[in-house]
């Protein structure tokens, strides 16, 4: 006979079982109200989406959203239950599936309008390519090409041959090769010429650029041993000479393109360093970083050492970028003595760092533009941006100010102010260019000022063609130096309306 305690336990278990059965029946009824995946996919509202994206993508998004609804319903979410009970549930659900499926495969790289005040903005893709380079990309992208095939002999060719002749003509180098960026160029040169040997470099040139690229770390990666000479602010030729020994692999100079040391300073020029290297049979390598192929003073800009000047002064190899002051695609270029370039190209790392047909096609077209210096300013977007007349930018601001003010209405005050643009990407760090900006200050009565300011910047970034400005001193600045297409900018301002 069961005890009183056992009877109580049995009663509790039976009551619990009845509750579970009742709850599960109710829960099952709710879940049965959810549409089947097949029913959703047959809906007229999703026909165009399936046609554009394919059934698998839409099916996956449908399953994801149904799973999310089940989790909400299991958790007792009243809003989800109310949504499920509405007559228009299926239409709303299909609309959500279509929107999210399209967003899942939306092109992540989009064009933006760079009004940040930095011409060569690393985060915005640096140099804009000229139309000739863009056309060349399209020409080879969808077809086979003679990337490494010699059409004359019918045998394997060298992909560098497509740009090497142009590089040599423009720089005076004996030979040249191309890798994917200048950091790779420096790494490859050190690995090829200085593995397990010392690289002599001034302490004041141990640079760090964006992304924590540091010369000491690059040297370690290349298995070259860093040997600092001189001091941070003053280094003399004797410092290099005194450090040369049996383990010295090369002399190296790194152009301090993203900072400047001023005051009581001293550094050694290319000519004496190259002479010292030749005296001891040691290569002298100059890393120009940004690198330029023309004397920028011809265009009214501050001087930056050119590749041709550096090689003429005696550098055995020069490394520089393709997408900075050169104004082309991302690339790292190594130019100089033929025997040293040949050693670099034999390095097993060269294959890992090489560029593809798209880069070479675009780079070739940019180099050809440099062969016609009289028209270079008009044809190379970088030079157009850098040399825009201040009065032209001011006139553009005066035309656009009322349009932006009308679009923002009473939410903000739009004024015109003089400003200064920077070249960017480690080029001419202390030289600024006179420009004009639209300056936007929020005036809405609700919300914190900082919140409204950030919201304004976000509103411009959410335009069909996003506009990137900069927040400075409690205002939102749109520096117009790089605004090439006024029509694209102004035609979308109506999207700023509340």
Image: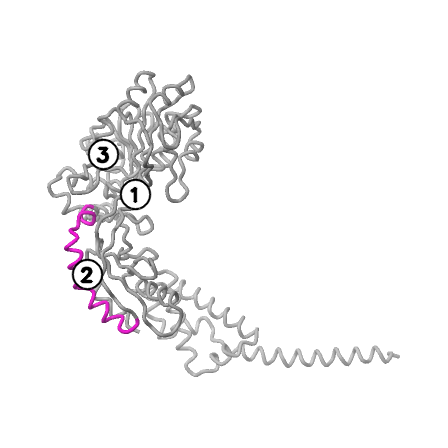
Quadrant showing the C terminus = bottom left
The residue that mark 1 highlights is: 429
Report the Cα–Cα distance between label 3 and label 1: 16 Å
- In this picture, is 165 found above or below 95? above
Furthest-right residue in this view: 1
Report if residue 121 is visible in the image. Answer: yes
The tag earlier along the polypeptide, 3 or 1, is 3
Q: How many other residues sit within 10 Å of disc 1, few (<14), some (14-19) or many (≥20)?
A: some
Q: In the rendering, at what x and y percent does residue 314 appear?
A: 25, 24
Quadrant showing the N terminus = bottom right
Q: In the rendering, at what x and y percent does residue 460 appear?
A: 30, 64
> Which span of residues is magenta-colored?
383-411
The residue that mark 2 highlights is: 397
Report the Cα–Cα distance between label 2 and label 1: 26 Å
SS state under label 3: loop
Q: How many other residues sit within 10 Å of disc 3, few (<14), some (14-19) or many (≥20)?
A: some
- Figure colour scheme: one colour
Q: In the rendering, at what x and y percent does residue 29 appear?
A: 56, 80
Is residue 211 toward the left or the right of residue 402 in the image?
A: right
Furthest-front residue in this view: 264
The residue that mark 3 highlights is: 306
Report the Cα–Cα distance between label 2 and label 3: 34 Å
- In this picture, is 60 found above or below 219? below
């Amino acid at each position: 006979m069961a005890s009183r305690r056992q009877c109580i336990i049995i009663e509790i278990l039976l009551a619990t079982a009845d509750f579970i059965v009742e709850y599960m029946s109710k829960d099952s009824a709710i879940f049965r109200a959810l549409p089947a995946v097949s029913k959703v996919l047959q809906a007229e509202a999703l026909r165009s989406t399936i046609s554009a994206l394919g059934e698998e993508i839409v099916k996956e998004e449908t399953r994801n959203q149904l799973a999310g609804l089940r989790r909400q319903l299991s958790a007792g979410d009243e809003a989800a239950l109310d949504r499920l009970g509405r007559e228009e549930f299926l239409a709303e659900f299909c609309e959500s599936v279509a929107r999210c499926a399209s967003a899942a495969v939306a092109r992540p790289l989009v064009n933006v309008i760079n009004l940040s005040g930095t011409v060569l903005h690393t985060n915005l893709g640096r140099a804009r390519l000229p139309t000739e380079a863009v056309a060349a990309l399209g020409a080879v992208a969808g077809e086979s090409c003679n990337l490494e095939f010699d059409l004359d002999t019918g045998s394997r060719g060298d992909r560098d041959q497509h740009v090497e002749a142009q590089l040599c003509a423009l720089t005076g180098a004996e030979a040249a090769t191309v890798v994917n960026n200048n950091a790779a160029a420096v790494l490859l040169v050190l690995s090829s010429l200085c593995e397990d040997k010392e690289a002599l470099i001034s302490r004041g040139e141990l640079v760090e650029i964006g992304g924590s690229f540091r010369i000491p770390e690059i040297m370690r990666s290349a298995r070259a041993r860093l040997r600092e000479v001189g001091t941070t602010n003053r280094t003399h030729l004797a410092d290099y000479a005194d450090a040369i020994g049996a383990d010295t692999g090369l002399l190296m100079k790194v152009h301090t393109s993203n900072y400047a040391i001023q005051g009581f300073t001293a550094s050694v020029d290319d000519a004496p360093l190259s002479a010292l290297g030749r005296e001891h049979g040691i290569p002298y390598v100059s890393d120009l970083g940004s690198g330029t192929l023309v004397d920028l003073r011809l265009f009214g800009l501050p001087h930056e050492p050119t590749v041709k000047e550096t090689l003429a002064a005696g550098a055995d190899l020069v490394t520089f970028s393709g997408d900075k002051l050169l104004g082309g695609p991302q690339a790292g270029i190594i130019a100089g003595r033929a025997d040293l370039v040949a050693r670099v190209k034999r390095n097993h790392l060269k294959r890992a760092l090489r560029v593809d047909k798209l880069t070479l096609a675009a780079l070739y077209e940019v180099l050809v533009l440099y062969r016609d210096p009289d028209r270079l300013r008009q044809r190379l977007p970088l030079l157009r941006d850098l040399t825009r007349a201040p009065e032209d930018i001011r006139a553009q601001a005066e035309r656009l100010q009322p349009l932006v003010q009308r679009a923002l209405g009473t939410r903000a005050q739009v004024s015109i102010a003089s400003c200064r643009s920077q070249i960017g990407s480690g080029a001419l760090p202390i030289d600024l260019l006179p420009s004009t900006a639209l300056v936007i200050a929020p005036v809405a009565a609700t919300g914190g000022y900082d919140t409204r300011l950030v919201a304004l910047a976000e509103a411009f970034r959410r335009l069909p063609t996003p506009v990137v400005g900069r927040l400075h001193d409690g205002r939102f600045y749109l520096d117009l130096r790089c605004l090439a297409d006024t029509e694209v900018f102004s035609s979308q301002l109506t999207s700023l309306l509340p």
